[in-house]
Image: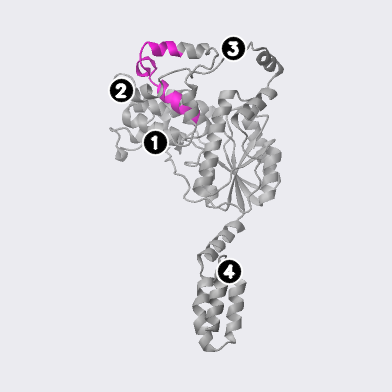
Amino acid sequence: PTYNCIGFMVAPHLVRPRPRLANWLSSFLLLAPSRALVAVRPFIHAVQHHPLRQRSSAAAAVDGAGAQLVWLTGAEDLRLSDHGGFEAASAAGAVVPVFVLDPAVHLSYPPPRLRRLHRALSSLEAALSEEYGVTLVVRRGGASAVLPQVAQECGATACHVVADDVEAPMRVSQRAACAALADSGVALRRWDGALRSGCPWSGAAAASLPPTFPEYASAARACTLVAAAGAPKALTPLEPCPTSEGLPGVEALIAEAAVAAAPAVRDAAARGSAASTEQPFEEVALAMCGRGAASAALRTYVVDGAAAFADATFSRACPPSGGGSPSLHCAGHERLLAGGPASRVFALREAATRAIGPALAVGAVSAREVRAAAREGEPGYSRAAGEAPPDDAQLWGRSRLGALADVVEWREGVTL
């Protein structure tokens, strides 16, 4: 009875497993009467096999592999599904996603692009926290200085980053940061979202790349489409996590960019002489950068059809009037829509391009996910016949799914 009482008194304090206490009890009870040992043995077994102890052991094994930085640049990589960085990091160790707000890169963006970036980042931050309990670490400064510092703080052994961007400022930042990480002993894991594998231009010199889109389309028939991967089943958070400066508000971000703008631009804005340059359908572009919006749009496009999708999505070109005049670009599209619904006045690929393009740019959706939606929605396609070519030329024009595939096929062809 005495040992049972001790067991009940100690058990509430063992919410977190204490191996030393269990081992001490084991050693102590070896000297106790056999009757008492039999009474307490179930308690010792419960402590040694407690789920929290097992979970702690698994976490310790992950920590031993070294933390894995996932550098989010804001260039085609702000998502969880079909993300090569998160996929590889989740299998290698505790994951530390990092976004570096680089004034030389991000503060050069115009306000619409900053809003899209902020929408995608805040959506990803919420998804990481709610679905995985992982904190997005936000820091400010040059990536080449910030990332090695974060790696040192958390003991990171590897950094996962998307392939070099097509825009020079981000590409320069990526290369400088990767060199700095390598110098500090952090292994680099580069990934990309290429549509196909086994292509003749993979890793080839620029001279061997297809010079025109028809040649690219012809060569692509012999390549294998890469399937889009889902989101990681689990991400192990690092504890303690490096401190985050937090994502600034969108208006504060825009105000910072205005201060950092060229003097002539600031002077024009101060005089109020700058004409509006807002793009038409900016509301749609911004919404598509939010959590799951682009994926939902793909499903609607495939199921309901291009015409129904265009009419439901693009009902107005200008946002509600806030007292200012719309840009000429917006006003021109409003005039077009006055002559009929979007399905009648839009070009063949316009609805898909306007809706999905902005999400592709920030990475809220991947090119592989778009290509898969077009490929799997094609009723005449047979998987047994092999990979579908990027062109599905019909007697009269392109199919709606062919137009959707073109959004990413053209993008990949031009990028090459």
Mark toward the start of the polypeptide (2 vs 3): 3
Crowding around mark 2 (Cα neighbors within 10 Å: few <14, some 14 to 19, many 20+) is few
Quadrant for residue 370, please give it: top left
Tell which of 44 and 86 is nearer to you. 44
The amino acid sitting under disc 2 is Gln
Q: Given this view, does label 2 or label 1 mark the residue nearer the observer? A: 1
Name the element at disc 3.
Answer: loop
Q: Residues within 10 Å of mark 1 (few under 14, many from 20)?
A: some
**Neighbour tally class for label 4: few under 14, some 14-19, many 20 plus, Cα within 10 Å:** few
Q: What distance separates the C-alpha of mark 2 from that of mark 1?
A: 20 Å
Q: Which residue is mark 4?
A: 13
The residue that label 2 is drawn on is: 394
Predominant SS of the magenta segment: helix
**Residue 284: where, in percent of width, then height?**
46, 25
Earlier in the chain: of badge 3 and badge 4, it is 4
Q: Earlier in the sequence, mark 4 or mark 1?
A: 4
Q: Earlier in the sequence, mark 2 or mark 1?
A: 1
Where is 145 relative to 260, above or below? below
Question: Mark 3 against mark 4, which lies toward the viewer?
Answer: 4
Q: Position of residue 202 (x, y in %)?
A: 51, 36
Q: Which sits in the foreground, 223 or 145?
A: 145
Read off the magenta span: 333-359
User: What kind of element bears circle 4?
Assistant: helix
Query: How far, Cα to Cα, is label 4 from label 1?
Result: 53 Å
What's the amino acid at mark 4? His
Which mark is first along the chain, 2 or 4?
Answer: 4
Q: Is residue 365 magenta?
A: no
